[in-house]
Image: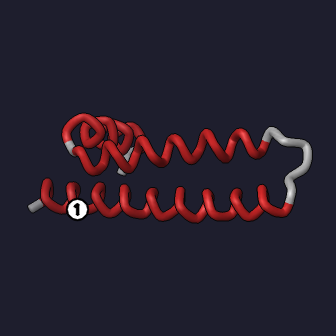
Amino acid sequence: MERNAQEELKAHLKASNEEFQKLATKHSELAQQLDALELLPHLTQEQELEETRLKKLKLRLKDQMEAILSQYRSQQVA
C-alpha cells in the first residue's frame, strides 16, 4: 500500500475508530517516554528494564493497530 494512502487510512481510523484512537494515543505516549529515556547520558539498570518494557508494550500496541488496519482493508476489498 502506498505510504500516503496508509497515512490517510490511519488518520481516518484515528477519527472514526475509538479503539484505534486509544491505541494510537497510548503508542504516542510510550514513544515520548522512550524519547525521554534516550536523552539520558546513562541508564541505570532499572531504567534499562523500563526501556525494554516500554519497547515491548509499544510494539504490542503497534501490532494491535496493524491488525485493525488489516481488518479494515479486508472489509474495503470485500
How many circles with numbers are drawn on the protein? 1
Q: Nearer the viewer, residue 68 or 36?
A: 36
Question: Which quarter of the picture shows residue 13?
Answer: top left
Q: Which quadrant would the C terminus be assigned to in this image?
A: bottom left
Q: Nearer the viewer, residue 45 or 22?
A: 45
Q: Which residue is mark 1?
A: 71
Q: Nearer the viewer, residue 2 or 34?
A: 34
- What residue is drawn where x is 25% and y is 37%? 12
The answer to whether residue 6 is above or below residue 72 is above
- What residue is drawn where x is 40% and y is 45%? 24
Residue 51 position, x and y percent, is 70, 57
Q: Left or right: where does residue 68 sit relative to residue 50?
A: left
Report the residue that reaches farthest toward the right: 42
Residue 63 position, x and y percent, is 43, 63
Q: Left or right: where does residue 9 sit relative to residue 24?
A: left
Q: How is the image coloured?
A: secondary structure
- What residue is drawn where x is 27% and y is 50%? 19
Q: Left or right: where does residue 42 sit relative to residue 16?
A: right
- What residue is drawn where x is 63% and y is 63%? 53
Residue 75 position, x and y percent, is 13, 59
Mark 1 is on which residue type?
Answer: Gln
Residue 35 position, x and y percent, is 69, 41
